[in-house]
Image (cartoon, rainbow, N blue to C red):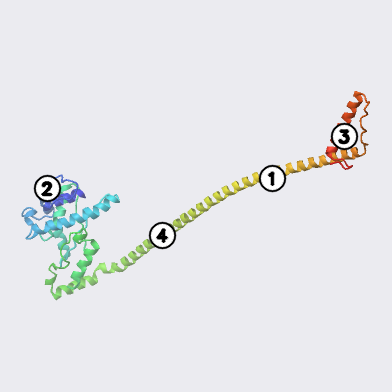
Amino acid sequence: MEELLCHIELIAGIASKGLAKPRLALLDLQHRMNAAYAESRQSANVGTAGTFFETWQDGDAESVPVQARIFVDFHRDVVLTVATRDEFEYVQLRGNVGLSHQGYRRCQDHVRLEDSSPTFFRLVHLVMMALWPDAGWHLSQVILFTITKVSQAEIGETIGSLMCGGYGGVGGMNFAQPAINLGGIDTMTYHDWSEANGRAVTSEWLRRVQPNLESEMQRRQSDIDEMSRQIRAFERAEKLAELGAVYSEHIELLAESDKELRAATAKLDVGLAESQRTLEAAERRAAQEKEAREVIDRVNRWAAAMDPLPPVPEDASPEVRAAMAAALDFDSDFEKLGRPDGGS
């Protein structure tokens, strides 16, 4: 696409805004375009009075550069940008929408690249043939409407230009106001219009309108149903994703709560174990105190049953004195424990 655009800029004599450089020099490009023009004329069994550039009409030298700038800028800034972004393998050029009271003959004029065809339209066609001569280029044409009165001319050409993207501002090759040139329709007589109405009424095309409309409506309804299905599927997927996020959040909260619960349980277990050890120690101490009191009681009862020891005689032997002292020491120990006869 960029190669085509930069060569259109070259042949139209306008400054190039593209990144690519033309692979053909200006004279070489002109020579190839003239050769393609002559070949097309010969293939259509019509003579060639001169070169393509000799067929330019008054005002083309001024209008073609302006039209080329509009055409190239739109395709480079819009069409080529989108095609590159979306990785399209090819780009289909938009065409030219015209008006004629002899439609099929007009189509033949375009194929033969007659002077009556728009100059810029023929220029783009010949640039492509010059750049890619072996591509097998051919011009596809179709009659969009059959009008039955003059007032329909502007409406029909306007609708056709909109449908086909024919306006130059959106990449087409129509740079004139629709129906500004009536193409001979204004010369048609009442008899001519009667014949046109008769052909329109009896045309097989009209019998295809209703089935075509029904088929198109069914196709569009199928597209709408498919789009609705995709929207519902997307909404379900979006809802599931939302629920999944909520579920994940709750799982994280549960995991955090479980972690806190385990920590609290472990702390409680430590407290319970400590309390258990304290209780067991208290129970052991109480048992020991109870056992000690029982021993003290038994000793006190035994000591109470014993008479106090007499004083040591003055003439007692050393052995007797030692035995008496030991007995006194034993008796003193009982007094410390508390005798039942008033001892502390």
Residue bearing mark 1:
275
Question: Nearer the viewer's eye, disc 1 or disc 4?
Answer: 1
For discs 2 and 3, the disc positioned in front in the rendered view: 3
Percent coordinates x, y for residue 174 in the rendering: 17, 61
Q: Earlier in the sequence, mark 2 or mark 4?
A: 2
Nearer-N-terminus badge (2/3): 2
* Residue position for label 4: 231
For residue 24, which quarter of the picture? Answer: top left
Separation of marks 3 and 1 at Cα, in angstroms: 43 Å
Considering every residue shown, the one lying at the far bottom of the view is 190
- Estimate how packed mark 2 is, as few (under 14), some (14 to 19) or many (20 or more) residues with alpha carbons within 10 Å: many
Which residue position is annotated with label 3?
A: 331
The alpha-carbon separation of the residues under discs 1 and 4 comes to 64 Å
| Residues at discs 1 and 4 in contact (Cβ within 8 Å) | no
| Element class at badge 3 | helix
Mark nearest the camera among 1 and 2 is 1
